[in-house]
Image (cartoon, rainbow, N blue to C red):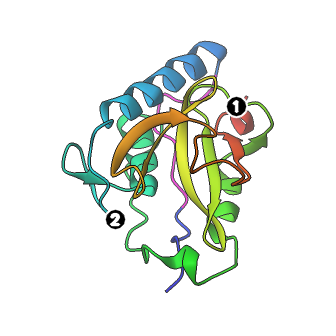
Amino acid sequence: MESPKAIQPQLRPGVLPVTEQIESLYRRRVVEQAQSWIGTPYVKLAARKRVGVDCAMLMVRCWVDAGVYEEFDPRPYPPDWHLHRSEERYLAWLDTLGTRVDTPQAGDLVCYKFGRCYSHSGIISRPGYVIHSAAYLGQAAETELRDGHLVDRGPIYFDLWEKYR
């Protein structure tokens, strides 16, 4: 089974054209959505607030619930695909959605290398912090971008708005 599925989310009506005000509004909405998931238990493949969520579905729910993208669902995907592959399919998919940047802003995406490839993501909440859901945390939480488990994991940052400016 390929993972994650090559789904191309569609922007919701009203997002385009992207002005500075629209980008700022949606960035704020994405962060607010991410904050609303804090404390939700980590559960592979889940996407139900206060019940369970993994890092991929947290990202999806925040984008969709903030009104950035139309509803989409990349499941099913094998929850341990990153342990058995060295291909960078997830990273390639993220490259189609956003533009890699060196300095992330609130609402941008960060991806870390776990296992054999880049496979863990989160949403930048403010300078130096990320909201993500991980097994080692046991829940969705806000941590420093380089907390103990994230140090030396080669973070790559994606600006989802760059392509539309």
**Residue on which the image places disc 2:** 44
How would you classify the magenta stretch by its main secondary structure? loop
* Percent position of residue 43, x then y: 29, 60
State the residue at coordinates (55%, 51%): 121
Going by the numbered disc 1, the residue's amino acid type is Pro
Q: Which residues are magenta?
A: 8-18
Q: Between marks 1 and 2, how big is the CA–CA gap?
A: 27 Å
Of the two numbered discs 1 and 2 on the same chain, state the one appearing first in sequence: 2
* Percent position of residue 21, x then y: 59, 13
Is residue 4 found left or right of 78 in the rendered image? right
Image quadrant in which the C terminus is located = top right
State the residue at coordinates (50%, 25%): 26
Q: Residues within 10 Å of mark 2 (few under 14, many from 20)?
A: some
**Proximity of marks 1 and 2: CB atoms separated by less than 8 Å:** no
Secondary structure type for disc 2? loop
Secondary structure type for disc 1? loop
State the residue at coordinates (39%, 58%): 135
Extreme residue toward the front, this view = 148
**Residue on which the image places disc 1:** 104
* Percent position of residue 131, x then y: 47, 37
- Viewer can see residue 27: yes
